[in-house]
């Protein structure tokens, strides 16, 4: 069957499935809307968390970045999984015990202050909206390829679908849909990886294939890759660092604590029945995530190898002729994300590190995973499945994030602070309007994303790392931390990170407004903006401790509350009061 | 309250032990010691590279389940389970 038709059928079927589930499990009450009624089994919750977590950045973006960063791309692998250890050990059980709906609610109660709650809402919105921009980039790439249109048109179509889909369901619908989306995305990711690993190394398990020898030779796959990339002038794949060791440490740490500070992930742990379940649920989430994350490095290395081998067939004397370029090449040219320029006029594709000779002038990193099965000449149904998987990943995360944004605005800002007497119905309506606003805003910025999908998402993690994580941690591990310290810390951490990011990436990521320019020699200690959350978090802790000393310790009843959330007994269900 | 204090300090000391492992496998083996470990080869993998792209992730999974299991036992031991 024609690839395009097949893709329509597979994507159409999966969408019908999600919409069916969303309709079946639609939310009737605010409690179901925000925390799915609090009765989701830990393994299922882990699976839903996995889908919620693994976004377009993980599915579409990450392996593409690793393919070009090589060893340096490890920051994403360790950063986006290691955060779960922090989440399970430092936050999830206590926030579950606390038993409310949202992260700002915890911060507001723990720091006995409406101001603290509002500051937390602002931090949450800044981080989540940045994250949604990253998703929009991924959604735009996936839809533009799938519909064979320009990136911008694909983005518009995607925005519309996200809108209808997330506004309808609420957390209950989202949780059950996400379980289905996890299944789709994990098959979509691993099946092509198994095929490609088999083709290249004869080993069906990609995690082992990456460490195996190539078929018909004694050379290890990674050694071969190191050899050809260095011959073409790039850095050695398995040892190239991301800028510097300091930067890699900061980047990894930033992603880890950002993971533990991102509200849409944290609220997942409000949906399990018991404190004990919050711990195991984090473990299950990581199991489901690790399946994709340990496959990704294999996908990355194999995609890079296949891409180079396509442009420079090892057996042939000459490079690939542009006129004989494969279909996938033409399709991606349509989207504007892959560009060829015949610099030396020989009609053949030169692909190498030297900018003056390289003729693949644009290879958007975000197309690698989607193009990978086509480059490897896999059957059409596998390619169609990957398109469905990429869309599942982007949709599930966008929905989770939009829910976090909506609940912060309607539940924390409107009901909690501005108009405490609104009805449940009005609150639900407000949150749906907030979702719509967030989609339009993030979509608009998605037309000019600050970085590739995974890079944009990394910025969001930095913002969460520098603002929310330290406040939560101090709220649980220090009984005496007062509101003044927490508020000052959050403001300082968020401002310093935003300031650093904006001065290099432009105000609201509009590049022309960057006042220092995105230049590595302006970077503090050589740390790139994407990795700056670690420094921001440090600033947050330091400022909080300094300000804490100027005021008295938290009141007795707050200290008792902290004592209370530290032990699992007497948790009950997540509730409004 | 002293019962709860004993529970909390047992919890914190378990946490610290596990976080040390967390740090060693990722920041230690995956980044800071990567060059040294890369001298050791396991199959086609350089060891440091393996830790950064595979080993650290497997260890993280184990750490969370160890924590969940030990904490469940601690909850019961100190009589604070649900």
Image (tube, rainbow, N blue to C red):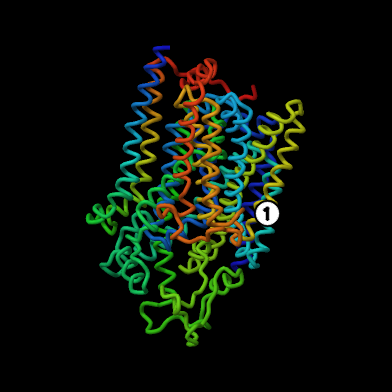
Q: Position of residue A504 (x, y in %)?
A: 53, 57
Which quadrant, please, contains the N terminus of chain A? bottom right
Residue furthest to the left in view is: B40
Q: Which residue corresponds to the image point at 56% horizontal and 38% vertical from the top-left?
A: A491
Residue furthest to the front in view is: A550
Left/right placement of residue A187 relative to residue B21 reads: right
Secondary structure beneath dot 1 equals: helix
Q: Which residue corresponds to the image point at 40% horizontal and 24% vertical from the top-left?
A: B72
Left/right placement of residue A443 relative to residue A329 reads: right
Crowding near pointer 1: few (<14 within 10 Å), some, many (20+)?
Answer: many
The correct choice, above or below, for B70 with respect to A216 in the image is above
Q: Position of residue A5 (x, y in %)?
A: 63, 65
Residue furthest to the bottom in view is: A346
Which residue position holds label 1? A159
Q: On the image, which quarter does residue A198 sit in?
A: bottom left
Q: Position of residue A142 (x, y in %)?
A: 59, 60
Q: Chain of mark 1?
A: A
Which quadrant, please, contains the C terminus of chain A? top right
Q: Position of residue A390 (x, y in %)?
A: 56, 55
Q: Which residue corresponds to the image point at 51% horizontal and 41% vertical from the top-left?
A: A493
In this rendered view, identify the residue nearer to me: A224 or A184: A224
The correct choice, above or below, for A435 with respect to A309 in the image is above
In this rendered view, identify the residue nearer to me: A574 or A280: A574
The correct choice, above or below, for B33 with respect to A345 in the image is above
Q: Which residue corresponds to the image point at 47% horizontal and 18% vertical from the top-left?
A: A563
Left/right placement of residue A432 relative to residue A489 reads: right
Count of labels shown?
A: 1
């Amino acid at each position: 069957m024609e690839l395009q038709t097949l893709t329509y059928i597979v994507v159409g079927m999966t969408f019908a499935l999600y919409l069916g589930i969303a309709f079946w499990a639609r939310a009737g009450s605010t409690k179901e809307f925000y925390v799915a009624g609090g009765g989701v089994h830990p393994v299922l919750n882990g699976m839903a968390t996995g889908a919620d977590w693994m976004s377009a950045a993980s599915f579409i973006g990450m392996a593409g970045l690793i393919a070009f960063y090589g060893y340096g791309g490890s920051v994403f692998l360790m950063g986006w999984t290691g955060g779960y250890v922090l989440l399970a050990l430092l936050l999830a059980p206590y926030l579950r015990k606390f038993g409310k709906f949202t992260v700002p609610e915890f911060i507001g109660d723990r720091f006995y202050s409406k101001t603290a709650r509002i500051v937390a809402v602002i931090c949450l919105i800044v981080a989540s909206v940045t994250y949604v921009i990253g998703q929009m980039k991924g959604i735009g790439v996936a839809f533009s390829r799938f519909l064979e249109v320009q990136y911008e048109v694909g983005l518009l179509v995607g925005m519309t679908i996200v809108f209808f889909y997330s506004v309808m369901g609420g957390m209950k619908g989202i949780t059950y849909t996400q379980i289905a989306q996890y299944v789709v995305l994990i098959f979509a990711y691993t099946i092509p990886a198994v095929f490609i690993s088999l083709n290249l190394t004869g080993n069906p398990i990609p995690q082992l294939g990456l460490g195996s020898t190539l078929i018909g030779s004694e050379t290890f796959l990674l050694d071969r890759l190191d050899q050809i990339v260095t011959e073409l002038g790039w850095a050695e794949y398995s040892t190239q660092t991301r800028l510097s060791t300091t930067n890699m440490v900061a980047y990894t740490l930033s992603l880890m604590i950002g993971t533990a500070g991102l509200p849409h992930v944290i609220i997942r742990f409000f949906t399990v029945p018991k404190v004990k379940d919050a711990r195991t649920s984090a473990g299950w989430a990581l199991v489901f995530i690790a399946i994709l994350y340990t496959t990704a490095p294999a996908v990355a290395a194999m995609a890079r190898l296949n891409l180079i081998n396509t442009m420079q067939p090892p057996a042939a004397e000459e490079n690939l002729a542009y006129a004989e370029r494969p279909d996938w090449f033409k399709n991606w040219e349509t989207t504007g994300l892959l560009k060829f320029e015949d610099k030396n006029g020989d009609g053949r594709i030169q692909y190498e590190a030297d900018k003056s000779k390289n003729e693949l002038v644009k290879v958007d990193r975000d197309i690698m995973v989607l193009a990978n099965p086509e480059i490897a000449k896999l059957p059409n149904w596998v390619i169609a499945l990957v398109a469905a998987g990429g869309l599942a990943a982007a949709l599930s995360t966008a929905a989770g994030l939009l829910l976090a944004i909506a609940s912060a605005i309607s539940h924390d800002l409107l009901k909690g602070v501005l108009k405490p007497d609104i009805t449940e119905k009005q609150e639900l309506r407000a949150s749906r309007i907030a979702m719509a606003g967030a989609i339009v805003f993030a979509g608009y910025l998605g037309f000019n994303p600050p970085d590739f999908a995974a890079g944009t998402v990394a910025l969001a993690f930095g913002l969460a790392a520098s603002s929310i994580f330290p406040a939560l941690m101090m709220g649980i591990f220090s009984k005496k931390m007062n509101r003044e310290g927490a508020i000052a810390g959050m403001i300082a951490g968020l401002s310093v990170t935003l300031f650093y990011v904006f001065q290099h990436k432009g105000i609201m990521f509009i590049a022309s407004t960057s006042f220092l320019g995105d230049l590595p020699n302006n970077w503090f200690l050589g740390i790139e903006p994407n990795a700056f959350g670690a420094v921001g978090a440090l600033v947050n802790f330091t400022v909080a401790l300094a300000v804490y000393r100027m005021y008295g310790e938290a009141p007795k009843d707050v200290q008792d509350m902290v004592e209370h959330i530290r032990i699992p007994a007497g948790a009950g269900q997540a509730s409004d009061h | 309250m002293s019962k709860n204090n004993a529970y909390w300090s047992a919890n914190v000391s378990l946490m610290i032990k596990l976080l040390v492992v967390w740090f060693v496998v990722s920041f230690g083996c995956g980044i800071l010691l990567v060059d040294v470990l890369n001298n050791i080869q396991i199959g086609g993998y350089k060891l440091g590279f393996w830790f950064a792209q595979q080993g650290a992730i497997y260890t993280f999974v184990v750490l969370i389940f160890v924590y969940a299991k030990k904490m469940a036992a601690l909850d019961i031991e100190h009589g604070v389970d649900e």
